[in-house]
Amino acid sequence: MDIKKTMAAQAYMQIRSAAAPEPLPNASEEGAARFLESFAHTLSRAEDVAKAAMTGNADPHALVEALASSQSAVDTVVTVRDRVVEAYQEILRMPV
């Protein structure tokens, strides 16, 4: 085995990896991540307000507002889930 060829191959692989373009983030993955983060934040905020209301440290109006917000978030997640399942079923029905 020729050492020069091996060194040339190693140098080529290093240059190739350095010159490779950065993969672009997938917009749908990024959007889904933001959506789920917002959902989790809404639910944790509602839990915090509910705990504060139980100890008497929160306004009842804030509790109702937080619960309505969390209910809306759960309804949205359920709707998105139903649409994804529906789309998956449509894909399975497609002829190959």
Image: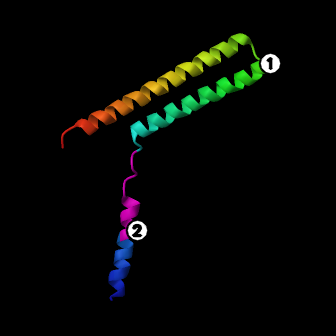
Would you say 95 lies left or right of 79 here? left
Estimate the x, y position of residue 73 in percent, counting from the top left: 53, 23
| Mark number displayed over residue 57 | 1
Task: Pick the residue in front: 17 or 36.
Answer: 36
Residue at the outermost bottom position: 1
Would you say 44 lies left or right of 94 here? right
Work out whether 22 lies above or below 91. below
Task: Pick the residue in front: 57 or 85.
Answer: 85
Residue 16, magenta (yes or no): yes
Q: Residue at x 40, y 28 (%)?
A: 82
CB contact under 8 Å: marks 2 and 1? no
Q: How is the image coloured?
A: rainbow
Estimate the x, y position of residue 93 in percent, counting from the top left: 24, 36
Would you say 54 lies left or right of 43 here? right
Estimate the x, y position of residue 30 in percent, counting from the top left: 45, 38
Q: Residue at x 41, y 61 (%)?
A: 18
Estimate the x, y position of residue 32 in percent, counting from the top left: 46, 35
Q: Residue at x 38, y 66 (%)?
A: 15
Work out whether 93 lies above or below 9. above
Residue at the outermost top position: 61
Would you say 83 lies left or right of 76 here? left
Badge 2: residue crowd in 10 Å (few <14, some 14–19, many ≥20): few
* Residue extent of the magenta highlight: 13-24
Amino acid at the residue labelled 1: Asn
Cα distance, mark 2 to mark 1?
60 Å
Residue at the outermost left position: 96
Work out whether mark 2 precedes mark 1 in sequence or the reverse, and give the earlier one. 2
| Mark number displayed over residue 14 | 2
User: Which secondary structure, mark 2?
Assistant: helix
Amino acid at the residue labelled 2: Gln
Residue 11, magenta (yes or no): no
